[in-house]
């Protein structure tokens, strides 16, 4: 383009034109009017000339054009003006907020850039020393307290160097800089503190530095991280470091970094299995559950002993119950009361009362009741006495005293009719007559209608007959024209006050029912119906009546009707049923045989009744379930009934359980579940009960003649197994239903049975054991093989293959050796 323009300008015509333009250039004032108008506008605006005065400008321009016509001008001199820009307004200085915002924006850009540069992060996070101070971002004052930068450096260092990286960042915070205060609230504060405390739980000296730093932060600024106590003390307890936990507990309490009520936040790690030395990760040893609750509370009690004048009852006890430590809560109640730490309100101790009553701790329940009455109800006694005294004074001031026996004599006197006696009572100002007076009044009446008329006259005269059962029943029977029942009531030898006693009337009802005295039976039934209107207690009375009469089928029908209406039996009815139906037995022995019923009939009747009551809210204590299982397990021929009861208990008290999770692993890692039904299941199938089930499985007589016919089928694989492993099979089935098994307990129980069958000869004190060893048709290898098949894997960790003698010859206790010596001596004397 440029060469073409140069060639154009070199032409002769172009050169002449350029010369003429240079000699006489056209001024700006010779442009068209619209351009002039624009120029005038701009000049007027610059000189603040009104727009209306712009016509003068146009005239001046026209005159100038006339003085200098085109082509006749003198040499034109081009004027040069210095065009100065308009004066700019002074820029305002940025405020402090704007500067702060700019600095924050710069920091954010720097952090974003730093996150993307791993080499730069490596360099900036290398601050675990005091070399080259001033070369890192954290050394600069504007980045020293940037918590976001510290978090980023810590995350990078942890990813690449693990615990050592965390320690490097801590060294940069404390040794390199020394005056960086960590935040105590927010997400970043939680991450920083948690990272440092977790490393301190692994390294004792590092934990001391972290706690000392927290104490210094509290002393200097008054701020502290709220979760420090729970993380430090609870973490040490989780690792079984009880001595160190108590030391840091005292240190944090003395430095005001924790309060006495914070102890309630570490109940679970202080009690559960992982805080004890004999507990290993992932498995609970059987010794833990066999230890008493007082021993499991040893650490928690030691923590509380270091507190002075604490008031933590209302926090500790409800929290323990919520976490599933009911037995421990009962022991902790006694400990706190001895230290004069009492519940402030009834609501603090009420959950403990409910637990002890529901789960069968009757002795403790009565003690708690007495304590509650002394602690709370005694405080309200003076007020009640005052109210009673006031009421008594008011009654004396308004009512005339009138003896009931005098009224009865007046109404019984034939010389005085009813109107005369009524007038005399009105003159004396009597407002109420008693039961004896009422009885004599009704006896002298001629009919039911006459009784109602006299009652009406008494009301019109302002005299009340009271609200006793006798008065209500007389009016009710007279209104219903039940002459026979009313006559029996009036001629009864029972005092009217006795009609108020429910227990007495129930006892009379049962005795009349057994004697088949139907008139007195109907009278007692009418009295009870009036005593208990609209309640389920009457159905309970009928149930107990049939139990007392030995009519189990009729009692079962009453239970069915109650279950149909959703009304469970009361605890008194269940206790009464157990007392009357079950045959008493000695500890460790089967109940003696009865001529008309067997143990199976008794237990299964009770079990079927409870099967209908428990789902609708009926309560059965764990001790009662254990007793029923014991009675079935002691009889070798009731195994199917025992299995049925165990399966129902597991399904009823542990529903919706994931069978892929081993219950003992979940309980070890997460602590006890607060589910009450699961807690009941654990109270029934204790380690001792699981060992007993293994023992009962071996109580089956097998001889060489019945060896082939006496086999059982594996429920999943279909293999034929010997009957002695049925206890292990049952426990595995219950595990699938949600029961937590104790493998060590089951292993020891099985070894004990193997020692009895195949171990070194040592005569047992039980005749059943001696008979099983003598008649045993199986070899040791077959029994061990079937045990492994029933368990699903090796129960003895392959010891039965490597050292089979160790399986059948476990170490014996001194008590077992003494019993064997006594048996040998007694047998020698018998010969």
Image (cartoon, helix red, strand yellow):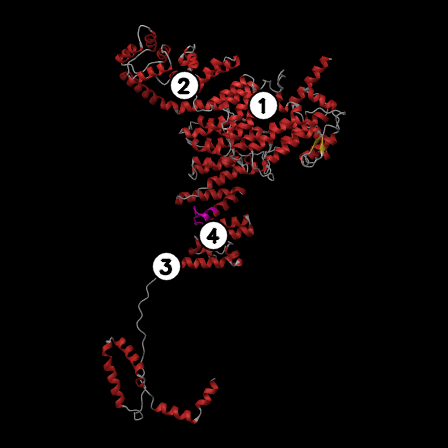
Instruction: Choose the circle earlier in sequence order: 2 or 3.
Output: 3
Q: Secondary structure at mark 1?
A: helix
Q: Which mark is residue 605?
A: 1
Instruction: Choose the circle earlier in sequence order: 2 or 1.
Output: 2
Q: Secondary structure at mark 4?
A: helix
Instruction: Choose the circle earlier in sequence order: 1 or 3.
Output: 3
Q: Mark 3 sits on what residue?
A: 98
Q: Give the quarter of the image for residue 484.
A: top left
Graded by Cα atoms within 10 Å as few (under 14), some (14 to 19) or many (20 or more), the crowding at tag 4 reads many
Marker count (numbered): 4
Q: Secondary structure at mark 3?
A: helix
Q: Which mark is residue 480?
A: 2
Q: Which residues are magenta?
A: 175-190
Evaluate if marks 2 and 1 touch, with contact meaning CB atoms under 8 Å apart: no
Graded by Cα atoms within 10 Å as few (under 14), some (14 to 19) or many (20 or more), the crowding at tag 2 reads few
The mark lying in front, picked from 2 and 4, is 2
What is the distance, in whole Å, between disc 2 and disc 4 at their CAs? 90 Å
Q: Residue 38: in sight, yes or no? A: yes
- The residue positioned 36% from the left and 90% from the top of the image is 21
Instruction: Check the image and report above or below for 79 versus 100.
Output: below
The mark lying in front, picked from 3 and 4, is 3
What is the distance, in whole Å, between disc 2 and disc 3 at their CAs? 95 Å
Q: Secondary structure at mark 2?
A: loop
What is the distance, in whole Å, between disc 1 and disc 3 at their CAs? 86 Å
């Amino acid at each position: 383009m440029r060469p073409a323009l140069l060639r154009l300008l070199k032409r002769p015509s172009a050169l002449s034109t350029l010369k003429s333009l240079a000699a006489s250039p056209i001024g700006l004032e010779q442009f068209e009017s619209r351009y002039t108008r624009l120029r005038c506008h701009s000049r007027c605006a610059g000189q603040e000339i009104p727009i209306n005065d712009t016509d003068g400008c146009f005239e001046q321009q026209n005159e100038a054009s006339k003085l200098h016509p085109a082509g006749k001008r003198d040499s034109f001199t081009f004027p040069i003006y210095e065009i100065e820009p308009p004066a700019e307004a002074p820029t305002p200085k940025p405020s402090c907020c704007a500067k702060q915002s700019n600095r924050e924006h710069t920091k954010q850009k720097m952090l974003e850039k730093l996150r993307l540069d791993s080499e730069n992060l490596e360099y900036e996070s290398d601050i675990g020393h005091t070399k080259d101070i001033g070369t890192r971002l954290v050394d600069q004052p504007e980045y020293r307290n940037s918590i976001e930068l510290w978090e980023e450096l810590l995350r990078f260092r942890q990813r690449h160097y693990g615990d050592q990286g965390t320690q490097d960042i801590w060294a940069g915070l404390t040794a390199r800089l020394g005056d960086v205060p960590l935040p105590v609230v927010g997400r970043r504060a939680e991450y920083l503190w948690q990272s440092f405390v977790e490393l301190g739980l692994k390294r004792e000296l590092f934990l001391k530095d972290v706690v000392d730093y927290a104490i210094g932060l509290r002393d200097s600024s008054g701020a502290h991280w709220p979760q420090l106590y729970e993380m430090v003390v609870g973490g040490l307890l989780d690792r079984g470091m009880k001595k160190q936990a108590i030391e840091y507990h005292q240190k944090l309490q003395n430095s005001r970094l924790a309060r006495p009520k914070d102890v309630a936040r570490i109940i679970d790690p202080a009690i559960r299995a992982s805080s004890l030395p004999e507990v290993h990760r992932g498995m609970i040893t059987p010794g833990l559950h066999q230890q008493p609750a007082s021993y499991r509370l040893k650490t928690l009690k030691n923590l509380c002993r270091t507190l002075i004048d604490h008031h933590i009852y209302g926090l500790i006890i409800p929290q323990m119950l919520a976490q599933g430590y009911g037995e421990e809560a009962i022991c902790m109640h006694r400990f706190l009361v001895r230290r004069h730490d009492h519940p402030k309100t009834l609501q603090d101790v009420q959950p403990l009362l409910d637990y002890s009553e529901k789960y069968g701790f009757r002795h403790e329940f009565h003690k708690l009741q007495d304590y509650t009455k002394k602690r709370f109800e005694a405080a309200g006694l003076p007020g009640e006495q005052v109210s009673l005294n006031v009421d008594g004074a008011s009654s004396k001031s308004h009512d005339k005293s009138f003896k009931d026996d005098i009224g009865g004599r007046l109404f019984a006197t034939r010389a005085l009719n009813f109107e005369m006696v009524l007038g005399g009572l009105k003159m004396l100002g009597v407002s109420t007559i008693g039961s004896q007076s009422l009885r004599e009044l009704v006896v002298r009446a001629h009919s039911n209608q006459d009784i109602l008329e006299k009652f009406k006259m008494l009301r019109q005269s302002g005299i009340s007959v009271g609200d006793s059962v006798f008065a209500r029943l007389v009016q009710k029977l007279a209104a219903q024209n039940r002459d026979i029942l009313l006559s029996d009531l009036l001629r009864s030898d029972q005092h009217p006050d006795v009609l108020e006693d429910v227990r007495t009337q129930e006892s009379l009802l049962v005795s009349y029912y057994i004697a088949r005295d139907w008139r007195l039976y109907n009278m007692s039934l009418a009295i009870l119906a009036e005593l208990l209107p609209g309640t389920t207690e009457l159905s309970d009375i009928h149930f107990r009546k049939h139990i007392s009469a030995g009519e189990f089928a009729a009692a079962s029908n009453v239970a069915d009707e109650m279950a149909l209406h959703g009304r469970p039996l009361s605890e008194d009815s269940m206790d009464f049923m157990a007392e009357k139906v079950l045959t008493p037995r000695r500890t460790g022995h089967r109940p003696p045989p009865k001529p008309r019923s067997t143990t199976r009939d008794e237990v299964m009747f009770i079990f079927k009744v409870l099967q209908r009551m428990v789902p609708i809210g009926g309560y059965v204590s764990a001790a009662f379930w254990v007793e029923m299982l014991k009675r079935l397990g002691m009889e070798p021929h009731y195994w199917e009934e025992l299995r049925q009861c165990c399966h129902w208990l597991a399904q009823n008290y542990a529903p919706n359980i994931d069978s892929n999770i081993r219950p003992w692993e979940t309980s070890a890692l997460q602590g006890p579940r607060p589910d009450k039904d699961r807690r009941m299941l654990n109270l029934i199938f204790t380690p001792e009960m699981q060992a007993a089930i293994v023992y009962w499985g071996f109580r089956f007589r097998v001889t060489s003649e019945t060896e082939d016919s006496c086999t059982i089928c594996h429920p999943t694989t279909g293999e034929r197994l010997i009957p002695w492993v049925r206890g292990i099979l049952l426990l595995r089935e219950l595990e699938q239903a949600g029961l937590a098994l104790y493998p060590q307990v089951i292993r020891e129980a099985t070894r004990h049975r193997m020692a009895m069958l195949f171990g070194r000869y040592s005569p047992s004190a039980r005749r059943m054991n001696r008979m099983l060893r003598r008649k045993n048709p199986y070899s040791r290898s077959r029994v061990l093989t079937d045990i492994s098949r029933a368990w699903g894997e090796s129960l003895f960790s392959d010891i039965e293959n490597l050292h089979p003698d160790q399986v059948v010859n476990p170490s014996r206790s001194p008590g077992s050796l003494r019993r064997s010596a006594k048996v040998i001596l007694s047998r020698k004397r018998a010969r």
